[in-house]
Amino acid sequence: QVQLVESGGGLVQAGGSLRLSCATSGLTSTRAPMGWFRQAPGKEREFVAALSYRTYYSESVKGRFSISRDRAKDTVDLQMNSLKPEDTAVYYCAARSSFDPLGTMQYSEEYEYWGQGTQVTVSS
């Protein structure tokens, strides 16, 4: 059974930093494609970043956020710097069991497993 558990969310002032972590268990591959999405109140879930054989970032976070994998800890982290109020959302970790060479890694439908989410609030 695959489980994804996010942690690291919280309240931070604009310009600050947070590091989210997604603890994984049950995935058959240590190279399983992983992604981070977010959903703000009243908005649809949107892609933030993903990691497979390379990294992927949305334009809104490129240069500020960084996704990385720690195989020893079985975690996928999202380092978020220069946070803005518009980054406020519930952040979700997602995984798929194998890499799809035709996939974009940027659509929620491409992922099979999801965490419960962690709240990030950026005050102005």
Image (cartoon, rainbow, N blue to C red):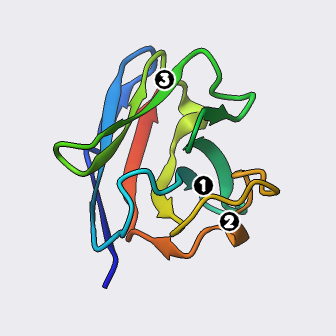
Q: Earlier in the sequence, mark 3 or mark 1?
A: 1
| Few, some or many residues within 10 Å of mark 3 (<14, 14–19, 20+) | many
Label 1 vs label 2: CA separation?
15 Å
**In contact (CB < 8 Å): disc 1 and disc 2:** no
Question: Residue 62 in the image: x percent, y percent?
Answer: 65, 22
Q: Which mark is residue 40?
A: 1
Q: Is 80 left or right of 8, judged from the image as shown?
A: right
Q: Residue type at mark 3: give it.
A: Leu
Q: Earlier in the sequence, mark 3 or mark 2?
A: 3
Q: Quadrant of residue 107?
A: bottom right
Which residue does the image show at 54% across and 25% down from the upper left?
84
Q: Which residue is mark 2?
A: 108
Where disc 1 sits, the SS reads loop
Where disc 2 sits, the SS reads helix
| Few, some or many residues within 10 Å of mark 2 (<14, 14–19, 20+) | some
Q: Earlier in the sequence, mark 1 or mark 2?
A: 1
Question: Residue 121 in the image: x percent, y percent?
Answer: 41, 41
Relative height, residue 84 to residue 87 (above, below): above
Residue occupying the far bottom of the picture: 1
Which residue does the image show at 27% across and 48% down from the upper left?
75
User: In the depicted view, which residue is nearer to us: 12 or 110?
Assistant: 110
| Few, some or many residues within 10 Å of mark 1 (<14, 14–19, 20+) | some
Q: Which mark is residue 83?
A: 3
Q: Residue type at mark 2: give it.
A: Ser
Relative height, residue 118 to residue 26 (above, below): above
Label 3 vs label 2: CA separation?
23 Å
Q: Quadrant of residue 77?
A: top left
